[in-house]
C-alpha cells in the first residue's frame, strides 16, 4: 500500500497465465531451413526429371544439393548470428565509454526516453538516480531502450547454424523420397509433386500458426511458391531439351 492506502503495482499478482511466445529466433531458423529445403531440391528434382534423367541420377544430385545447401544455409545462419553478437559487443563498449565520459549527458538521455512514455521529470527522476547508482543496470537500460539492442545468447550462432542445417535436410529429403522407391523418373516426379505439395501446405499452415498470420492463407502461399519454383525448373529443362 502507498501512503493513501492504495495498492502498489508490486502488490498486484496476475490472475492469469502469460501466454507469450518467446522462441521467435528458433522458429525463424526452422522456417528458413524447411522452406528452402522443401523448395530448392523439389525444383532441382523436377528440372532433372524434365530433362529425362533417371531416378538414380535425380536422387544422387538431389542428395548432393541437400548436403551442400544445408552446409551453406547453416554457415549463413552462423555468420549472421555471429555478426549480430559482434555488433552488440561493439555498441556496448561504446555506450559504456560514454557513460563514463559524459554521465550527465547519458543521464539526460534516460529522461528523454522516459518522457516518450508520458512520464514527467518528477516521476522519472528517481529512476534516473537509481540507474546512476547501478552502472550495469544503466548500461543494460541504454542498450535496450536507447539503441534497441537485445543481448544475444552466446550460444546463438552455433544453435542457429545447426537448426537451419537440420531443418534444411529434413525439408530437402521430402521431395526426394519418391525417387528412392520409384525407378521411373516421371512417375517419381508425379509422386514427389503430390507429397511435396502436401508437405508445403502442412508447413505453411504451421508457419502461419506460429507467426500469427492466417494459417490457411499461409499454407496456400507456401504451396504456390513451391509449385511455381518446380514448374519453372521443369519448364526450363524441357525447353533446353527441345533445342
Image (tube, grey):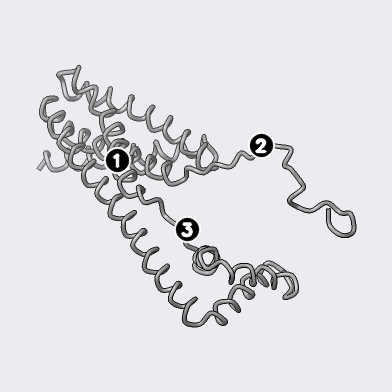
Residue assigned mark 1: 162
Q: 181 or 27: which is nearer to us?
A: 27
Q: 57 or 50: which is nearer to us?
A: 57
Who's the residue at 55% across and 77% down the image? 106
Who's the residue at 21% across and 37% down the image? 66
Judged from the image, the secondary structure of the residue bearing numbered disc 3 is loop
Name the residue at the front extreme.
133
Residue assigned mark 2: 17
Measure how far apart labels 2 and 3 are at the Cα level.
24 Å
User: Which quarter of the figure is the C terminus placed in?
Assistant: top left
Judged from the image, the secondary structure of the residue bearing numbered disc 2 is loop
**Residue 59 appears in which quarter of the rendering?**
top left
Answer above or below: position of 97 versus 222: below
Residue 221: percent from left, percent from top: 44, 40
How many tags in the picture?
Answer: 3
Measure how far apart labels 1 and 2 are at the Cα level.
32 Å
How many residues crowd around disc 2 within 10 Å: few (fewer than 14), some, or many (20 or more)? few
Find out whether the residues at labels 1 and 2 contact each other: C-beta distance under 8 Å.
no
Amino acid at each position: 500500500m502507498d501512503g493513501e492506502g492504495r495498492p502498489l503495482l508490486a502488490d498486484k499478482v496476475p490472475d492469469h497465465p502469460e501466454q507469450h511466445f518467446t522462441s521467435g529466433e528458433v522458429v525463424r531458423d526452422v522456417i528458413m531451413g524447411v522452406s528452402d529445403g522443401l523448395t530448392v531440391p523439389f525444383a532441382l528434382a523436377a528440372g532433372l526429371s524434365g530433362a529425362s534423367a533417371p531416378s538414380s541420377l535425380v536422387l544422387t544430385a538431389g542428395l548432393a544439393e541437400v548436403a551442400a545447401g544445408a552446409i551453406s544455409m547453416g554457415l549463413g545462419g552462423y555468420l549472421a548470428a555471429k555478426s549480430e553478437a559482434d555488433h552488440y559487443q561493439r555498441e556496448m563498449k561504446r555506450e559504456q565509454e560514454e557513460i563514463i565520459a559524459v554521465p550527465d549527458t547519458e543521464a539526460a538521455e534516460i529522461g528523454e526516453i522516459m518522457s516518450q512514455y508520458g512520464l514527467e521529470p518528477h516521476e522519472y527522476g528517481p529512476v534516473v538516480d537509481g540507474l546512476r547508482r547501478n552502472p550495469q543496470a544503466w548500461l543494460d537500460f541504454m542498450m535496450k531502450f536507447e539503441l534497441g539492442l537485445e543481448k544475444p545468447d552466446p550460444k546463438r550462432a552455433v544453435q542457429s547454424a545447426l537448426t537451419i542445417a537440420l531443418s534444411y535436410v529434413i525439408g530437402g529429403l521430402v521431395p526426394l523420397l519418391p525417387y528412392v522407391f520409384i525407378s521411373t523418373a516421371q512417375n517419381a516426379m508425379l509422386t514427389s509433386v503430390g507429397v511435396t505439395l502436401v508437405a508445403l501446405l502442412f508447413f505453411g499452415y504451421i508457419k502461419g500458426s506460429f507467426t500469427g498470420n492466417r494459417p490457411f492463407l499461409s499454407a496456400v502461399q507456401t504451396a504456390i511458391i513451391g509449385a511455381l519454383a518446380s514448374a519453372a525448373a521443369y519448364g526450363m529443362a524441357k525447353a533446353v531439351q527441345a533445342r
